[in-house]
Image: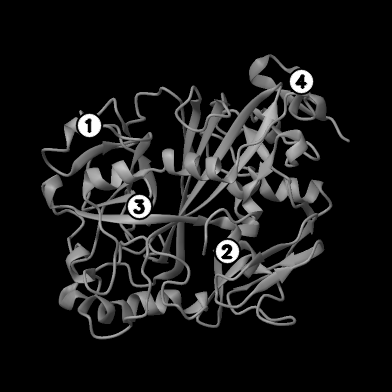
Amino acid sequence: MKSFIFLIPILGLSVFAFTDSALSNSPNSWILSDDQRRAFLHYYSPIILKRSDENKIKGKTRGHDWITNFNFDQDGDFSNNRKNWEKEKVKFIAGKDHENWNIQPTLYTAVIEFMKNGEKSLILLYHVYHAMQGCQKLEQVICKNEDIHDWERMEVRINHVTDQGPGHGENVGYSVLTAHSKHTGRLGGHPDLHYLDNMETPQTIEGKHLFIWQAKWRGSTGPRKGELRFVEDGLHEFLDGTAKVDVSGHDNKPFHYIFVDQDAKDAAAFWNAKRINADNASDLASGRDDDDIIKTRKTKRITYELQDLADVFPTHWVHANGQGTNINWAGSTVQIELTEPIQSSITGNAIDIPAGLQAFHPLSLDDGDKGKRSGYPKKHWFWGTYFWGNEGKWTSDAYRNRGEVWNQHDYFAHEGSEHLRSKPSPEEEAGEWLPEGWHKAENGGFDGRWVQLFSE
């Protein structure tokens, strides 16, 4: 097994060696149950305050700012998601067609669980999906060219985890939101971190649900294209007043939707949030202009569900739709050495990928044409290769350093530290590559990026 050595200039150019014995193989190693892993994901699931831009004439953009899922139209084909969302959703909302659609807002998740020096830490990943993104070219003043797939993500590190499950002595190490190429980080206890929890409400709330503001689906300036921001106001500042909050980097931004985890029962009940279906879709579509100011009690409250990143990743396989065929993804392949097989049936057809060296397409297809949106194999956060609290990523460098073959369980675990330089290097990133075997139960680990915890 390897030792991993990093130079940390922010600590006086000291040399730190992170060895296997420090991170795993401890006699005190233990693992959570799947029920406990799900419980952590629900306990820390975010509340999303979403701004909308849905007032185009004749209701053509109603519901455009709904969060949704990859297979909302139930046809197993992701390449037509933009077209169906843009052109066909209006029929679903009007009750005229597509009763079989399942527009269920979804956050795709994973738990990364590992031991270090006898203590348990978790990294929780939450990936927010939309079927389309507006105004891809920043120089456009009027958004005309929509793009397929928009996805935003939140990452939470939890330290000092116990075997009693969430709410039993653990603490938030940090939270990270990715807005385009910047990975805004906040250490636990930062004043920008506001939660729906027992500190904020007179009633019992199970969990700590971070308030996150999300931008509208289109735009060429300011917060745009679904980016996420920390909410700098507490619940008491907007609950009984105007649906407008200060967000990280900006002041006074309105919101028109509140999305909440359906299985965070106390939080869902607090907001009286509803699941979207064919009968209530019209009532739950905002239809508001992005600059409309409304009362918080007038916002649309909608539930989302948690599903697995592991459902979607297999769809990138070069043989996902038959030998040498993939209808959802394209581009030069990313090579991954799978030490365990993976599978998915998210598209309605079983995808079973055996262990061994496998190739995955990284770019989206948009209705049969080659796309430019990066899928999971090239997402920096999937491998942990981003700069915490800064712009940019070092995914390509890490991939090249591995001989252009990822190991299935490669992951860089951040510890959360701001950089002193505006353009840092990977060697300055506070954290470590988790060592070989970290994910094994006997070492106290679990790599949820490849494992289904939720039923599809």
Question: CA gap, disc 1 to disc 3?
Answer: 18 Å
Please name the residue that numbered disc 4 is placed on.
16
**Residue 175 x/y as whole percent:** 47, 34
Q: Earlier in the sequence, mark 2 or mark 4?
A: 4
Query: Which tag is nearer the camera, tag 2 or tag 4?
Result: 2
Farthest-out residue, right? 1
Please name the residue that numbered disc 3 is placed on.
262
* Crowd tier of the residue under label 3, counting other residues whose Cα lies within 10 Å: few below 14, some 14–19, many 20 or above: many
Please name the residue that numbered disc 1 is placed on.
203
Question: CA gap, disc 2 to disc 1?
Answer: 37 Å
Question: CA gap, disc 2 to disc 3?
Answer: 21 Å
Task: Tell me which amino acid carries mark 4.
Answer: Phe
Residue at horizontal 39 percent and vertical 64 percent from the top: 68
Task: Tell me which amino acid carries mark 2.
Answer: Val
Q: Earlier in the sequence, mark 2 or mark 3?
A: 3
Task: Tell me which amino acid carries mark 3.
Answer: Gln
Q: Is residue 108 left or right of residue 449?
A: left
Using the rendered image of the protein, determine whether residue 254 is visible from the camera's viewpoint. no
Q: Nearer the viewer, residue 439 or 247?
A: 439
